[in-house]
Amino acid sequence: MNILILTGKFGMGHWSASQSLRLQLLNAFPAANVTVEDFFAYALPDASEAIYKGFSLLVTHGSGLYNIYYKATENASLKTRPPLESLFQDKLAELLWERRPDAVIATHPFCAQLVSDYKEELCSTLPLVTCITDLTSHSEWINDHTDCYLVGSPEIRDRLEEKGVDHGRILVTGIPVKPEFKAPARRGQDGVRRLLIMGGGLGLLPKRDSFYEALNALPDVRTTLITGGNQKLYDKLHGKYENIEVVGFTDRVYDYMARANLMLSKPGGITLFETIFSELPILAWEPFLQQERNNARFITRYQIGRIAAKEPEACVEAIRRLLYDDKALRRMGQNMRLLKGRLEAQSLARIVATLAAQGRGVCA
């Protein structure tokens, strides 16, 4: 079996989901050939980094404009033509000819649309699985020639059905995470409360010294701060506070989640489901991107965490209220355990294998 996963590095969520899907498939089918391709780097090797940097600047400094566009197109019934469509279609055809996949999984909406258009133009039966990497039913993810959708929650399944997607083509899997996040927690009973703070791959974290001084002063609390790609913040804080461990980029986030009692983070889709599978209650910064607002509503609906204000003093107070509330933390962990049990992640490998073998659109 030869599976090709197409994605892009607009943020690290799409890439992370792709790697997790690859591991799930290889675990189920050790003899399979499963590859992940950054399609934008493949198609535009000299321009992809500039495109990714431009996107990061947009969502960091132009979130208002981004949200306006996102909401305006959320329920659009007509597909817009992708920019440089002819170039991208030529590159897709070249890639598919090189790899000869039995099935394609797309974890980015642009990739899903390109493959769907390719199938229509060539009357291809190549199976296409679209993995939606946020808790959204945005129309950008919906394409006529998608054979199966992997979605994060029953609510997203219902919204896709309202938009005309057949029930049998939708599988509620949760957003894919590495198998290590599903390992049993290792939270200590030594009376020390452990707080984990993450700011995503870009390390978007508070800058004020007063925030970290207040954290350092919390009684019986040890904080781990993962700064990701934010080298400037790492250099500023590393070794400065007795009760704050500062970690740069790491591919072992699951280890830190397994030991923590509470995590403070922006509510990205991948991060959210990493905490769910780790049964780690989440305190999410009040989001500014529309996708993350959807994720924040999911957190409060399922009572698996709370939302914290961005203002440092208010954020520290939200940490204090929840981190010392053992009853609330226990209840949130239980809710995460129940939510995990409702997801159908173990069906993923079987579905993709069925699609690859039969070359037709079935999700059950």
Image: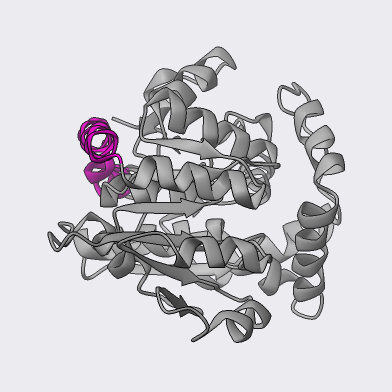
In the picture, which quadrant includes the N terminus? bottom left
Q: Give the left or right position of residue 157, taking residue 314 as reference.
A: left
- Residues shaded magenta: 325-354
- x then y, percent, for residue 323: 35, 47
- x then y, percent, for residue 90: 75, 62
- x then y, percent, for residue 127: 45, 45
Q: Is residue 340 magenta?
A: yes
154 shown above or below 264:
above
Q: Is residue 345 magenta?
A: yes
What secondary structure is the stretch in magenta mostly built from? helix
Nearer-the-camera pick, 3 or 285: 285
Q: Residue at x 44, y 77 (%)?
A: 250
Would you say residue 257 is visible in this rendering?
yes
Q: Residue at x 74, y 57 (%)?
A: 89
Q: Residue at x 61, y 49 (%)?
A: 313
Choose top left, top right, bottom left or bottom right for residue 162: top right
Nearer-the-camera pick, 224 or 68: 224
Would you say residue 111 is visible in this rendering?
no
Q: Give the left or right position of residue 333, taking residue 213 as reference.
A: left
Nearer-the-camera pick, 332 or 244: 244
| Tally of numbered tags | 0
